[in-house]
Image (cartoon, rainbow, N blue to C red):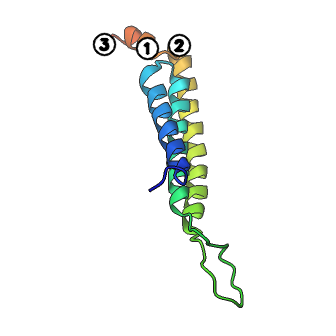
Amino acid sequence: MSLSGSYHYLAVVLLMVTGLYVVMVNTNLIKKVLGLNIFQTSVFVFYISLGRLEGGTAPILADELSRYANPLPHVLILTAIVVGVATTALALSLVVQIHRAHGTMEEDDIDDREGGATIS
């Protein structure tokens, strides 16, 4: 397996690690939502890359025989994008409500105000 044909897997791993890092390191809730979106994008790129067919064409019927690429991964990802946008909108609206209730979007400050246990 050559690395030259697998550059999209490198992009997937880079996006996945970046998204996971942003979620784990930041205490700001907005940045955590953005990190989850980056992670979600890596899953989309990975799933679409699995639907690639070498020498495949669009699945349009023609007189001659040819190899068709499977359109199902692309259709599923379009649906996942719509669900992801709705989930992001819900998460951001929850962050707004948390900010109204606590006056901050930082996890540590919210834990301190609520008297929650901190992990050391």
Residue depicted at x 44% and y 10%: 109
Residue linked to disc 2: 104
Name the residue type under label 1: Ile
In the image, which is nearer the foreground, mark 3 or mark 1? 3
Q: Secondary structure at mark 1?
A: helix
Residue depicted at x 71% and y 86%: 62
Name the residue type under label 2: Thr
Name the residue type under label 3: Thr
Asked whether residue 107 is in view, the answer is: yes
Residue situated in front as seen by the camera: 49 or 5 = 5
Q: CA distance from mark 3 to mark 1?
A: 11 Å
Residue 119, percent across and down? 29, 15
Q: Is residue 23 above or below residue 62?
A: above
Residue 83, percent across and down? 56, 50
Q: Which image quarter is the C terminus in?
A: top left
Residue depicted at x 59% and y 50%: 81
Of the two numbered discs 3 and 1 on the same chain, state the one appearing first in sequence.
1
Q: Residue 88 lies in what quarter of the image?
A: top right
Residue linked to disc 3: 118
Q: Residue 21 lies in what quarter of the image?
A: top left
Q: Residue 52 lies in what quarter of the image?
A: bottom right
Q: CA distance from mark 2 to mark 3?
A: 17 Å
